[in-house]
Image (spheres, helix red, strand yellow):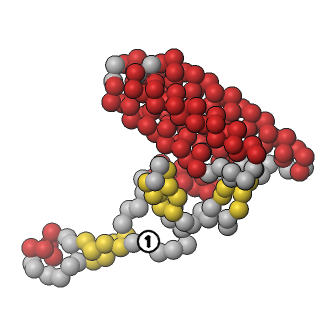
């Protein structure tokens, strides 16, 4: 199901999504899993065929849970998940800076940047508000990049503060929209 919700474009939950041009495949539980040929030690030792076929483990339980969380959420809540994820990664980056772990600070910062790029790429630029959101995301992205280069906590804290305000504003907008539609829980 394609379409848009507010300023954000939505895609089919059974397709391939990308963050920063890296594809993310969301598996449809109704399609069969991939299989791989598995050889037991006895079949290899005896020179017997390729053994049995077993399903490939396609995801860790945590990532499966996270995927289901995304797929079952109402569309208007998806930006909340992205804001929360970016804030979490910025917090991890700040903690790593405090510990002196530059590589972990960098890795967490890059993950936050990827989320901001995803927010930017999903905006429906035919809507006026999208242009304003794009500018805000661009500024946040700039602060994250500069904060990552200099390992500057002030810049990262500014980006986090802006994202917290945007998350809280979006959450309030979702509540108001539900109230207007008469929806208690969705």
Which residue is found at the position 62% from the left and 65% from the top? 12
The correct choice, above or below, for 77 with respect to 25 in the image is above
Q: Which residue is mark 1?
A: 33
The correct choice, above or below, for 170 with respect to 33 in the image is above
Q: Is residue 91 left or right of residue 174?
A: left
x and y, in percent, of residue 32 in the image: 47, 75
Q: How many marks?
A: 1
Which residue is found at the position 75% from the left and 43% from the top? 129
Q: Is residue 8 visible?
A: no
Looking at the rendered image, the quarter that the N terminus falls into is: bottom right
Is 18 or 168 nearer to us in this picture? 18
SS under mark 1: loop
Is 164 or 145 nearer to us in this picture? 145
Mark 1: give few (<14), some (14-19) or many (20+) Cα within 10 Å.
Answer: some
Q: Is residue 149 left or right of residue 116?
A: left
Which residue is found at the position 33% from the left and 30% from the top? 103
Q: Is residue 96 left or right of residue 77?
A: left
x and y, in percent, of residue 114 in the image: 49, 42
């Amino acid at each position: 199901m394609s379409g848009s919700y507010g300023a954000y474009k939505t895609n089919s939950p059974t397709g391939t999504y990308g963050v920063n041009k890296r594809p993310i495949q969301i598996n449809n539980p109704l399609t069969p899993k991939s299989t791989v040929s598995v050889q037991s030690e006895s079949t290899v030792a005896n020179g017997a065929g390729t053994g049995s076929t077993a399903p490939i483990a396609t995801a860790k339980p945590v990532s499966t849970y996270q995927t289901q969380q995304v797929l079952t959420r109402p569309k208007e809540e998806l930006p909340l998940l992205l804001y929360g994820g970016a804030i979490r990664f910025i917090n991890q980056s700040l903690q790593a800076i405090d510990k002196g772990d530059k590589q972990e600070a960098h890795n967490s910062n890059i993950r936050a940047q990827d989320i901001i790029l995803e927010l930017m790429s999903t905006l429906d630029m035919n809507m006026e508000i999208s242009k304003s959101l794009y500018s805000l995301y661009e500024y946040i992205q700039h602060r994250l990049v500069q904060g990552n280069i200099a390992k500057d906590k002030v810049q990262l804290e500014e980006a986090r503060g802006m994202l917290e305000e945007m998350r809280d504003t979006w959450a309030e907008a979702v509540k108001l929209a539900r109230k207007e539609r008469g929806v208690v829980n969705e």
